[in-house]
Image: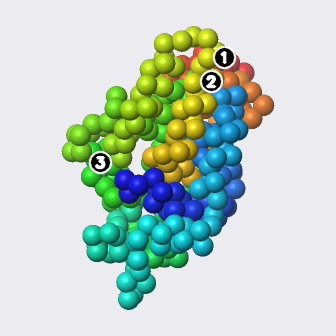
């Protein structure tokens, strides 16, 4: 998986529309190749989105790319890598995370069309967290960091600043992917407060992300929450989305405090 073309081929084999429809109940859209949700729409580069053709669902193209890379199919239809090892991997997702389990079941089925065999396992959440944060996994679903700009997201996916040795716990960059070019761009971004320059640099970062495909975006991560207006009003809503309403959105983003100082007693 060190070859971005292999990662892109695998991406072409993932039916994201089915994942969103089945696992996410159509609450959210399919991701684009930047990995950014609509909360970052003012930062999104259309050129980067358009360049992310590997986000389409095209199993035929995926198989063509794997064939061209020399990943041939064995007698049982399972592909083998260039060292002759069957392409069989463990895909881990926490027990009880029913939406993610459903997404993983779809991906597992999708990969059979490519000759890739996934063994879906559901360890307890604490075990799963320990495994992914230490980088001791083969395939896993994950999430990215948030913030007022996309800087934190890309820093958490491509920077040496977030990459720990395998075996050491890391809150971000679980695959331990590092792009020196990304680090240069992220450093430039952090050193300017000029919004026009920031957007230009971020467009370059997005295009680099699309070119490298360090991870394969599936869908924007939703924040599920509910509230009652029986005693308080002013909660975040679709009409007044001033902050995430989820109670765990505290430090380092302190959005919980924004909510608590905005709601008012009836």
Classify residue 230 by image quadrant.
Answer: top right
Residue 21, labelled with which disc? none
Q: Tell me whether circle 2 and circle 1 mark residues in contact (CB < 8 Å).
A: yes
Q: x, y percentage for residue 140? A: 40, 55
Q: x, y percentage for residue 250? A: 48, 26
Q: Is residue 149 left or right of residue 73?
A: right
Q: Secondary structure at mark 1?
A: helix
Answer with mark 2 or mark 3, whichever residue precedes in sequence: 3
Dot 2 crowding, Cα within 10 Å, few <14, some 14–19, many 20+: few
- Residue denoted by label 2: 200
Classify residue 198 by image quadrant.
Answer: top right
Q: Is residue 153 left or right of residue 50?
A: left
Q: Residue furthest bottom?
A: 75
Count of numbered circles on the image? 3
Quadrant where the N terminus is found in the figure:
bottom left
- Residue denoted by label 3: 135
Q: Residue furthest left?
A: 167
Residue 196, labelled with which disc? 1
Of the pair 237 and 86, the residue shown nearer to us: 86
Location of residue 39 with respect to 108 vertically, above or below: above
Q: Is residue 113 left or right of residue 125?
A: right
Dot 3 crowding, Cα within 10 Å, few <14, some 14–19, many 20+: many
């Amino acid at each position: 998986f060190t070859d971005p073309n292999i990662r892109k081929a695998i991406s072409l084999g993932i039916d994201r529309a089915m994942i969103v429809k089945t696992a996410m109940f159509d609450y959210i859209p399919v991701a684009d190749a930047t990995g950014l949700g609509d909360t970052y729409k003012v930062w999104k580069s259309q050129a980067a989105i358009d360049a992310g053709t590997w986000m389409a669902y095209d199993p035929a193209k995926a198989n063509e790319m794997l064939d061209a890379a020399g990943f041939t199919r064995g007698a049982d239809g399972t592909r083998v890598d260039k060292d002759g090892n069957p392409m069989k991997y463990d895909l881990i997702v926490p027990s009880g995370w029913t939406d993610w389990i459903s997404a993983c079941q779809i991906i597992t089925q999708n990969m059979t069309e490519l000759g890739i065999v996934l063994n879906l396992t559901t360890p307890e959440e604490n075990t799963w967290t320990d495994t992914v944060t230490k980088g001791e996994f083969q395939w896993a679903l994950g999430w990215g960091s948030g913030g007022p700009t996309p800087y934190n997201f890309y820093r958490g996916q491509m920077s040496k600043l977030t990459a720990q040795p395998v075996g050491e716990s890391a809150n971000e960059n679980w695959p331990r992917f590092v792009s020196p070019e990304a680090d240069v761009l992220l450093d430039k971004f952090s050193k300017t407060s000029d919004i026009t320059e920031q957007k230009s640099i971020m467009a370059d970062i997005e295009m680099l992300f699309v070119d490298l495909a360090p991870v394969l975006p599936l869908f924007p991560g939703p924040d599920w929450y509910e509230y009652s207006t029986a005693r308080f009003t002013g909660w975040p809503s679709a009409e007044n989305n001033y902050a995430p309403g989820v109670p765990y959105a505290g430090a380092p983003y302190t959005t919980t405090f924004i909510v608590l100082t905005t709601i008012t007693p009836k």
